[in-house]
Each structure stands twice: as structure tokens, then as C-alpha cells.
Image (cartoon, coloured by chain):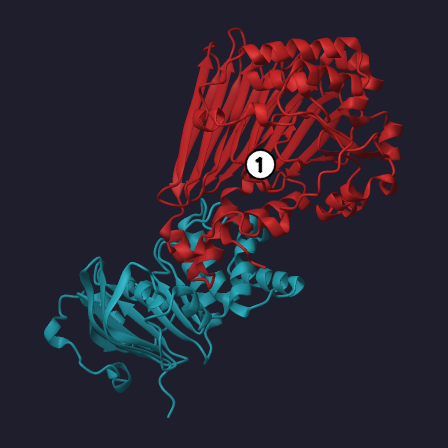
Amino acid sequence: MSNQTLESIGQDYDTQFGFHDPENYVFKSGRGLTRETVEAMSAMKKEPAWMLEFRLKALEIYHQKPMPRWGDSKMLDSIDFDNIHYYVRPSEREEKNWDDVPQDIRNTFDKLGIPEAERKFLAGVTAQYESEVVYHSISKDLEAQGVRFLSMDDGLRQFPEIVRQYLGTIIPPHDNKFAALNSAVWSGGSFVYVPKNTHVNIPLQAYFRINTENMGQFERTLIIADEGSSVHYVEGCTAPTYSSDSLHSAVVELIALAGAKIRYTTIQNWSKNVYNLVTKRAVAYRNARVEWVDGNLGSKLTMKYPAVYLMEPGAHGEILSIAFSGDDQHQDAGAKIVHAAPNTTSVVTSKSISKGTGRSSYRGLVRVEKGATGVKSSVVCDALLLNPESRTDTYPTMEIHDSTANIGHEASVSKVSDEQLYYLRSRGLSESQAMMMIINGFIEPFTRELPLEYAVELNRLIQLEMEGSVG
Amino acid sequence: MSPPFFVAEDLHVAIEGKEILKGVDLVINTGEIHALMGRNGAGKSTLTHALMGHPKYEITRGRILLNGEDLATLPPEERAHKGLFLAFQYPTAIPGVSVVNFLRAALKARRGADMPIKEFRTTLFAEMDRLGMEKQFASRYVNDGFSGGEKKRLEILQMAMLQPTLCLLDETDSGLDIDALKIVAEGVNHYMNPNVGVLLVTHYQRLLNYITPHFVHVMIDGRIVQSGGAELALQLEAQGYDWLTPQLRDQSPVAGRQSQ
């Protein structure tokens, strides 16, 4: 396989995505994380006392907890936590009207193509810029249905009881160091509440960006689908390129009550200086369904293991993920399913591609608790290595405590076969076209689940990474 | 006088340093169907892959000329653009890629532009129908989980859609029952026209009951040792290969035509 068909990632990134507006913010916290930072942030947001308490307790836990020793320790140890601004607020208030949004922020969204997308495709948009939600709009349909799609800050203000009831119950601050960090300094993210038997027919979307150098991004998302309801939430983000490191440490909690369905789709394409350490977890109750569709293309290091806890009979969890690692990247992704009730089912499909010196890992857990009878679970993880120096690792764990469980696990590692390339080339495709076709075929189980515009964007992004600047 | 459509001239091919073809001479003119027969291991498939440009097959001596142009230095995709097509004996699976997407991409690579979608669909379904393939076959993944017969039919479908001028059909009949064989043969016969040359590699005489060759060549140990008309195939069927020895090798590349 000739080397010139493989271009390094990011050759075109600066012109396409890598831009940043001059820093023009109303408030920017000093570097480093102190009690004062958290108190100032909470006061500025005018939060209830219990939320400040929640934050401060989490801060304590964060300082106490050691850094995890698994994953990519070398990369984790190199994060300089003292050199990060933990809170930046670009404007005084949230805007509902697009025309009122400050110009440089609108420019950012213009460059990302959001206004058009909003017009054409979206039901409602919450767009995060730095740490605050700058702009969101909710279409009349959603409001009429009683669906709440707000920034997390607004959700806290308008529905404090719901937030207090659920926030931190799925992912408590002591869960891990980064959950604690997020719990202390979270800002922005989405709050979604879908009432009983209500079906949201269009995907709800949000965008995130990191802009200030050394800016941490700690959005917190809470989605509650009440009984019999259904919703699809789509998250996708880009970030400009920097020489120093950026930290993205989000927490996403999903609650699917009886008979409800939540699908959460992510295409992550952070620039290669970002550490993306995310905790995502869902609980599914009786006959409920949660699907994580998780695409990881960017960042220097991603550690993310979407999880579904199946709490009552008939619940179903699915995790469909792809990871693409190019030079100097490490996608440490995976899935976690816990069967805590009988007659629950789960499907995990993981596809990873490693290119150049990239490293992809699958880290997964399937646990069946004692008494959870009649469980069916299937895990398929496939890895594709594009170069001799590419690397992939699989760490699957099965903890099965009930003998009636029906568990399947298949794993494969392959490289692009010469025979496949030759067959396609004999039909007139160039080597790079043949390679793209094979890769598209490899991730097809994933792309067929994406909304069309995301499938198109994903295809373009992968093509960019495979071929360099195409023009 | 224009050059012959296709000439293989003293072709020597090696795989990993081991010489398999030891001087193959062959001339194919447009409008002609040439059958290539021989035992397993004689080098028949090696010839087709060497002509198509398989990276592992090295041409150590000789030339392969299509319309006077030597293809030997060209990669497989460029040979395809010049009109070459190989129906594989063992077609490769491309999981996740549907037949229809694959054909559209191949067609675009061949023509330089997308065929209008309506025309594409009409043509595709007509050709599929001719080959006894149901419409939903187009959404299956290329050769993934296909039976032998389905794979062979897809090869002929590709040929019909891509419209090559030099068709190399490698054991297109192997693994087919008589009904499938008839359909595939009909597909080839229908495609045949005065602008197309066909090299039909076959192990058994049976296919030649349905596709009548103009010339039959016999390969033994990396060389074509005998050429003749269609009746040569019948003779091989009746008598086997033993009566042919290297001493019987005919030196002239146009022997087949002279014997007509």
C-alpha cells in the first residue's frame, strides 16, 4: 500500500474548522480551580443554595480522588489542571432571537453553518459557546407538546424540582474524578424533559465549542423521557486548533421511564489538542429503550464508555460506536451494559479504525446481576488497522452472575485486504477510492443509523482524514 | 493496417519469484470468443490476473498489447478504464457496500461522471432481470454471504453495466448448476458484439455447449500448447489432456485462425 495515498490528519483543518475569534468575553475566571471560582460562578448564575452545596461537595471529592491509572495514563498525567480557565461567559443573557446574538458569536455559528441547519433541519437549537448557552430557540410545536428543551442553566431555574430529583442520581460526583470535576464546575449543556406518551419527531440538536485558550468545557446534560415518550437528541462539536491543551469533561445523564425511548447521537470531532473525558450513562425502566450512537473522530485522547443500566424487565439497551484514530490520537471508547432485571436485552456494536500511529481501544463491560434471568446480550467489536504501526486493543469484560444468560461476543481485527483493493481497482476505482469504499462498508452499520446530514458530514470528515486536502 | 485488438506476446509471469507462465502467445480480435482450457495449476487464472494487473503477479518478459498499447506498466484501474474486465473465479466480498452503490461508483469511475439515476436504475433492473436476479438483490452487500451462483451472476451483471471491450471470464461456470449456467451463458452471449473480445477460461467442456467459442486454446504448464476450433474442446472432453505433449506445441500465435 503506497504511503502517498495516506495524508496526515489536519492538513486542511485550519482553513476548514480551525479559527478562533479574538477573546471578547464579559467574564473569564482566573486560571486554576479554587473554591472561590466555584462560588463566583454559582453567584453569577444566581443558583439556589443546594446547587452551590452540590458543587462544593463535588469539588472536595475532585481534590481527593486520584487520577485513574487505566486508560492512557501518560496522556492523563500530562494535563495541566492549574492552567485552565474554568468559566467564561460571553454575554450577559441568553438570546432567543438570532438577530440579537453578538456579532462575533454569530460569525462562529455562521462558519459552522448553523443558521442554515437550524432553518432546514432542526426543531430547536441550544448552541453552547464557551460555557454559557448563548442562543437557543424552541419551536412552537415543541412548546405545544409540553416538551422542555432548555439550556441546563435555564432548566435549573425553571424546573428546580425535576433537576434536583434527577441530577447526579445516575452519575454521582464520587463516580470518578472527572464526574466530580464536572459536578463542581458544570456550565451549559441541555435539559430535556419529554412528557408522558409524547413523541418528539425531529432530532433535538446542540453544538459545542471551545474557544479561549486553555478553556475547559464542562457541560452537563440531563434528559428525562417520561413514560411512553420518545426523543432523539443529537450532539456534535468542533473546536479550533491550539498549541496548548483543552479539556472537555462532560457528563450526560439519561432517564428512560417505563415504555420510553431515548436515542442519543454524537459525532465528536475535537481538534487534536483536546482531552475529551466524558461520562455518559442511562437508566432504562420497564420496557424502555436507550440507544447510544457514538462517533469519535477527533481529540488527542477520548475516554468515553456510554452505559445503559437496565433496571426493570423488558428494558433494552444499545450502544453503537465508531472510533477513528489517526496519528498521535488515542480513542479509548467502549460500552457498559448492566442487566439488573430479568428479560432485558442489549446489543453492542463497536467499529474502530486505526490509521498511522493512531491507537483505538475498545473497553467494554457486560454485567448480568444474579436474579436477572432470561437476559440476551450480544457484543460485536471489529477493528480495522490501516498501517503496520497502527494499534488496536480490546478489553472486554463479562461479569455474568446468572446461568440463564445468553451472551454472545465476537471480536475481529483485520487490515484492509489486498484482495479487496485489487477487486475494486479492477473495476476502475483508484486505490484511495477503493480504500474509502472499504472503510465506508466497514462502518456502514453505524452510518445507516445517523440522520442524513450527519451521515454526509461523517463521510466527508473521514474522507478528509484519509486523503488530506482534496479541495 | 491497424494492430490486432489484443496481443499477448511471449508472456512470462512469476508469482513470488516462481515462474508460472513460460511464454504465452495469444491474439484476440474483436468479435471473437476464445476458450482457454487446461488442468488445474496449468496457469489459466494466472494469465487472467496478470492481464488484469494483480500486484503479486510479475511480468518478467513479454508484452500485453491492447489496441497496440502495452498495459504491463499500468495499474488495474487504468486497465479497466481502457476496457479490460475480469470476471473473477473467486469474487471478493466487500461487506457493508451495497451492490447498487458499488455499481454506481464503478460506473462513475469508468465514465468519468454519474449516470443519471433514472437511466441507471432502468438499465440495472433490466440487466438483473435478464440474469434472473430479483430487485432486492441490489441492496445486498457485494459478494457478502452470496452463494457461488449469485457471485458468478454478479460478475456478469458488472460486465453488462460497465461495458468493457476485452472480457476475461475466469471459470465463470464453476459451481453453477445447469439452470444457472444457462442464464450466465445467455448473459455472455447477449453481451457479445463485434466490438468485444472474450477470453473464456473454463475447466469443463459443458459451458461451451452454451457459449460457442471461435477458438479453443489448451494451456499446459504455463504455455499454450495447442489451438484449434470449437471441436478441440470436444476432443479434450473425450480424450483428456494426455495426448498433448510439449512437442505438439504450435509456434504460431495465429494457428487457431489458420485451422478454420
- What residue lies at 29% left-to-right and 62% top-to-bottom? B45
At x 64% / y 16%, what residue is drawn? A34
Residue B118 lies in quadrant = bottom right
Spot occupied by residue A197 in the image (x, y as percentages of width and height): 80, 22
Q: Nearer the viewer, residue A243 or B119?
A: A243
Q: Is residue B60 left or right of residue B115?
A: left
Q: Where residue A264 appears, x then y in whole percent? A: 66, 30
Instruction: Indicate whether B79 appears above or below A166.
Output: below
Picture layout, residue B112 above or below residue A376: below
Tell me the subunit letter for badge 1.
A
What color does chain A have in the rendering? red
Q: Colour of chain B?
A: cyan
Residue in the foreground of this view, choosing between B88 and A8: A8
- Determine the residue located farthest toward the top in the rendered image: A371
Residue on which the image places disc 1? A295
Residue A144 visible in the displayed image: yes
- B168 or A267: nearer the viewer: A267
Left or right position of B103 against B50:
right
Instruction: Report the amino acid beneath label 1.
Output: Gly
Q: Give the position of the C terminus of chain A as an image quadrant.
A: bottom right
Query: Residue A392 location in percent, x, y?
Result: 41, 34
